[in-house]
Image (tube, rainbow, N blue to C red):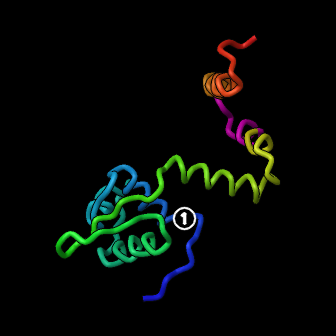
Amino acid sequence: MRKRKKSELLTEVELEFMTGLWELGQGTVRDVLDALNPPRDLAYTSAATIMRILDEKGFVSSKRDGKTFVYCPLLSKDEYQGRLLRDVSAKLFDNTPAAMVARLVDDQDLSVDALDEIRALLDRRMGKDERG
């Protein structure tokens, strides 16, 4: 079997499958298919191929349990989110996270509550308990 080059990022369908697997913690192809939201009308063999590709790319590990494989994520959703955001920051925002956050704040029509939550997160990160 040919080994694929390890990719740092997931395709859209791979991300759907990883999201299902993150929710499960571990599972078979059938478990992951059942966890997809919204459900996909996808042949079992196609889903098994996607899981095998995730294994080859190093996103999941697999172990045989009888005739089936049980898959486990090799990185957490938080770890992947960080990886993806670093990639977006580098490719689209010249490694300037402030520009990325500014775009999010400017373009998302955020509520006052959402902006207050972001401010509180920044205050905690900066070591402040209160705005001042």
Residue 106 covered by magenta stretch: yes
Picture coordinates of residue 131, whole percent (x, y): 72, 13
Comparing 109 with 5, the one in front is: 5
Query: In the image, what residue type sits under mark 1?
Result: Leu
Residue 58 covered by magenta stretch: no
Comparing 118 with 37, the one in front is: 118
Magenta stretch in the rendered image: 102-111
Left or right side of 14 for 68: left
Q: Residue at x 71, y 41 (%)?
A: 104
Q: Quadrant of the C terminus?
A: top right
Q: Is residue 46 above or below residue 21?
A: below
Comparing 16 with 124, the one in front is: 124
Q: Is residue 46 above or below residue 114?
A: below
Left or right side of 90 for 111: left
* Dominant secondary structure (helix, strand or loop) of the stretch shown in magenta: helix
Q: Residue at x 78, y 40 (%)?
A: 98
